[in-house]
Image (cartoon, rainbow, N blue to C red):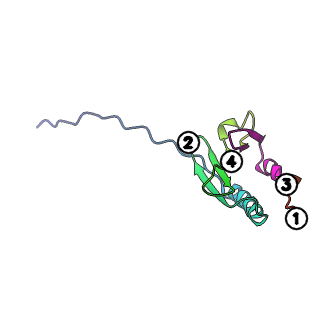
């Protein structure tokens, strides 16, 4: 008795894992978001886990383009730093290796509430 085997079909490569935020990073981002919402600067946010980056976008209104994008790009860890804050249009406002240091950008006086 001769058994025939099915021809070997190659398996597709596994999908690349998406980059995402760790719990500590999300806590820092959401803490900043809460402060900015209570100050009246921001009203909505979005979180995206992409192939090469995790993005936290903040909006003044949900129907607009994001005011800022806070990006985590692990591929840039040895060069410019994992973290970046980008303005509308892709202008890089701040880059760094530590999220806490990068988020200090929002502590500047220009974000103070003026009566």
Instruction: Name the residue: 39% across, 38% down.
Output: 12
Q: Is 86 drawn above or below residue 104 in the view shown?
A: above
Q: Which residue is mark 1?
A: 115
Q: Is 93 drawn above or below residue 38 in the view shown?
A: above
Pointers 2 and 1 in contact (C-beta within 8 Å): no
First along the sequence among labels 2 and 1: 2
Residue stretch in magenta: 85-106
Q: Which residue is mark 2?
A: 51
Q: Examine the rendering and report whether any part of residue 108 can be seen.
A: no
First along the sequence among labels 1 and 3: 3
Residue ranking furthest to the left: 1
Tag 1 secondary structure: loop
Instruction: Name the one closer to the observer, 56 or 7.
Output: 56
Q: Which residue is mark 3?
A: 107
Placement of the C terminus among the 4 image quadrants: bottom right
Q: Which residue is mark 4?
A: 69
Residue 97 colored magenta? Answer: yes
Instruction: Name the residue: 56% across, 45% down.
Output: 50
Instruction: Name the residue: 65% across, 60% down.
Output: 44
Residue ranking furthest to the front: 115
Instruction: Name the one closer to the observer, 62 or 80.
Output: 62
Q: Sort mark 2 into few (<14), some (14-19) or many (20+) by Cα contacts within 10 Å.
A: few
Residue 95 colored magenta? Answer: yes
Residue 42 falls in image quadrant: bottom right
């Amino acid at each position: 008795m001769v058994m025939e085997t099915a021809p070997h079909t190659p398996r597709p490569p596994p999908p690349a894992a998406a980059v995402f935020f760790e719990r500590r990073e999300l806590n820092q981002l959401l803490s900043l978001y809460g402060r900015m919402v209570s100050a009246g600067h921001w009203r909505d946010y979005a979180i995206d886990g992409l192939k090469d980056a995790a993005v936290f976008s903040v909006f003044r209104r949900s129907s607009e383009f994001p005011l800022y994008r806070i990006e985590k790009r692990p591929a840039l860890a040895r060069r410019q730093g994992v973290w970046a804050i980008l303005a509308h249009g892709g202008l890089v406002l701040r880059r760094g290796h530590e999220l806490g240091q990068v988020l200090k950008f929002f502590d500047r006086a220009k974000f103070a509430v003026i009566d």
